[in-house]
Image (cartoon, grey):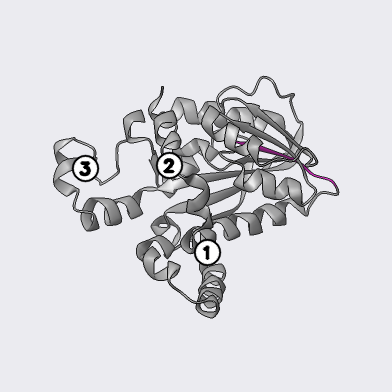
Amino acid sequence: MSFLEEYYNSRDEENRLLSQHGQVEYLTTMKYIHECASRFDAPRILEVGAGTGRYSIALAKEGYSVTAVELVPHNLDILRSKLNGTEPITAMQGNALDLSAIRDRSFDLTMLLGPMYHLYTLEDKMRAMSEAVRVTKPGGYILIAYCMNEPTIIQYVFLGGHLDDVVKANMLTDDWHCKSEPKEVFELARTEDIALLNSKFPLDRIKLVATDGASHYFRDFIDEMDRESFAKWMEYHFATCERQDLIGASNHTLDILKVRG
C-alpha cells in the first residue's frame, strides 16, 4: 500500500470539506467551476483525482455530465456508494499520469483538484498537465488546485512547533521552500512554481484564486461562527480571493487555465 493510500484510508476527507472552514474552500471552488461551466451549453466535465466525489457528485446532481477518475480504491468505493444510479456520472479508477482510457479533446472542463498535491517531481507534474491538456477541447478550461508552501511554514513549522524536526530532517531549502517526498504525502508550491509549469503548455491563465484565503489560520474560530458572521466572512473572502498580493498566503489555490484553440 502506498503512503497516499494509507493517508486517505485513515482520513475523513469528506467531513473536512463539510466543516465550516472547509466550506470556504468548497464554496469558492464550486463558484469558479460554475463560472467556467457556464461558458458551454452542455459541458462535459472530467475530474481527475475525484476523491470521495464531493465535487463530482454535486455537479452530477446538478445535471452536468461528469466523468470521475480516482486513484485510491477506498475513495472510489465511497464515491460509488453515494450514487443511486440516476446521476449522469461515470466513475473509474485511474491515474492522473496516464489517462489513456480517455480520448483526446473529450471534455470542456477538466479538473485536477487533488493530483498536484501528491506529485513530487517536475516530470510527473508535466505528465499530469500534458494529459489534462490532451483530453480537454481547445477553448476548454483546466482547473488545478495546489497546496501552498508559506502557510505550512507559518502554521506547521512555527506555530505547530515542528521547526527542529524539519531542520533535522533537511526538509527546507535555504530560501524556506519545503522539500517533500511521498512519505510526507503533500507537495507544496509557490506561485512561481505554478507559473513555471504553466509556461510549458499552450495555456492561458484566466485567474489564480485563493480558495480558502486566511480561513485555515483561525479555523476553529471560523467553525464557531454563527450563520450571519460566516456569511459576512464569505462576503469578505469572495471580495479578496482574487487579490494576487494575498495568493501565496492561502493554504489552497485554484489555477484556472484555458486551452488555446
Magenta span: predominant SS is strand
Is residue 43 on the magenta stretch? yes
Q: Which residue is mark 1?
A: 241
Q: Are marks 1 and 2 in contact (CB under 8 Å)?
A: no
The quarter of the rendered structure image containing the N terminus is: top left
Specify the amino acid type for callout 2.
Arg
Mark 3 or mark 2, earlier in chain: 2
**What whole-number distance in Å separates the C-alpha atoms at marks 3 and 1?**
29 Å
The x and y percentages for residue 87 are 78, 42
Residue at 74 percent of width and 45 percent of height: 60
3 or 1: tag closer to the N-terminus? 3
Which sits in the foreground, 162 or 103? Answer: 162
Please tell me the numbered disc located at residue 11.
Answer: 2
- Magenta stretch holds residue 237: no
Q: Give, as a three-letter code, the residue at label 1.
A: Cys
Query: Residue under circle 3?
Result: 174
The C terminus - image quarter: top right
Q: Residues within 10 Å of mark 2 (few under 14, many from 20)?
A: few
Q: Is disc 1 surrounded by few (<14), some (14 to 19) or many (20+) residues within 10 Å?
A: many
| Image coords of residue 124 (percent x, y) | 48, 26
**Where on the picture, by quarter, is residue 97?**
top right
Q: Secondary structure at mark 2?
A: loop
Cα distance in 3D space between marks 1 and 2: 27 Å
Label 3 SS: loop
Which comes sooner in the sequence, label 1 or label 2? 2
Horizontal and vertical percent for residue 128? 55, 29
